[in-house]
Amino acid sequence: MSNKSLFYQRYGVDEYYVYDPDTLELSGCLRSQDSFAAIEEINTWVSPRLGIRFQLTTDTLGIYYPDGGKFLTSVELDQPAEQEYQRAEQEHQEKEAALLQLEQE
């Protein structure tokens, strides 16, 4: 992580955030002149550059758009695709069963 921080400093990154979902730890740093300063109070922090808000709860990290809408997690983004896959799979199995029954008759 220290190599990343040096890279970010060298290439002018204004802010960066690190989240560990296993420990539910969030940290962040803001550019302060030629170095980074740690964000002391990160919970409910609003990024000055992006306008997004970070909200830690007891079991996850929520990230919110400037208008208050919640960023979807990868799991939430995957749910519609998984539901469609399950529906298509069930339809396929029903067609296979109908064909098998027709063959038996």
Image (spheres, grey):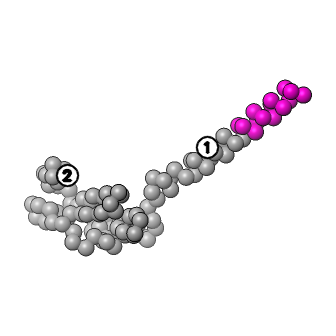
Residue 96 screen position, x and y as percent: 75, 33
The rendered magenta stretch, by its main secondary structure, is classed as helix
Q: Residue furthest front?
A: 23
Residue at the spot x=40%, y=69% of the render?
A: 58
Residue 15 screen position, x and y as percent: 23, 61
In the image, taking residue 38 as reference, residue 19 lies left or right, namely right
Q: Is 73 above or below relative to 48?
A: above
User: What residue is shown with label 2?
Assistant: 1
Mark drawn on residue 5: none
Residue 91 screen position, x and y as percent: 72, 41
- Asked whether 35 or 27 is in front, the reply is 27
Residue 64 appears in which quarter of the rendering?
A: bottom left
User: What residue is shown with label 1?
Assistant: 85
Q: Secondary structure at mark 1?
A: helix
Q: Residue furthest left?
A: 34
Q: Which residues are magenta?
A: 92-105
Q: Is residue 102 magenta?
A: yes
- Precedes in sequence: disc 1 or disc 2: 2
In the image, taking residue 103 as reference, residue 12 lies left or right, namely left
Q: Is residue 75 magenta?
A: no
Which quarter of the rendering shows the C terminus? top right
Q: Secondary structure at mark 2?
A: loop
Q: Amino acid at mark 1?
A: Tyr
Residue 35 appears in which quarter of the rendering?
A: bottom left
Q: Is 91 above or below relative to 78?
A: above
| Residue 66 seen anywhere in this rendered image of the structure | no
Mark 2 crowd level (few <14, some 14–19, many ≥20, 10 Å Cα): few
Q: Residue furthest right?
A: 105
Q: Amino acid at mark 2?
A: Met
| Residue 12 seen anywhere in this rendered image of the structure | yes
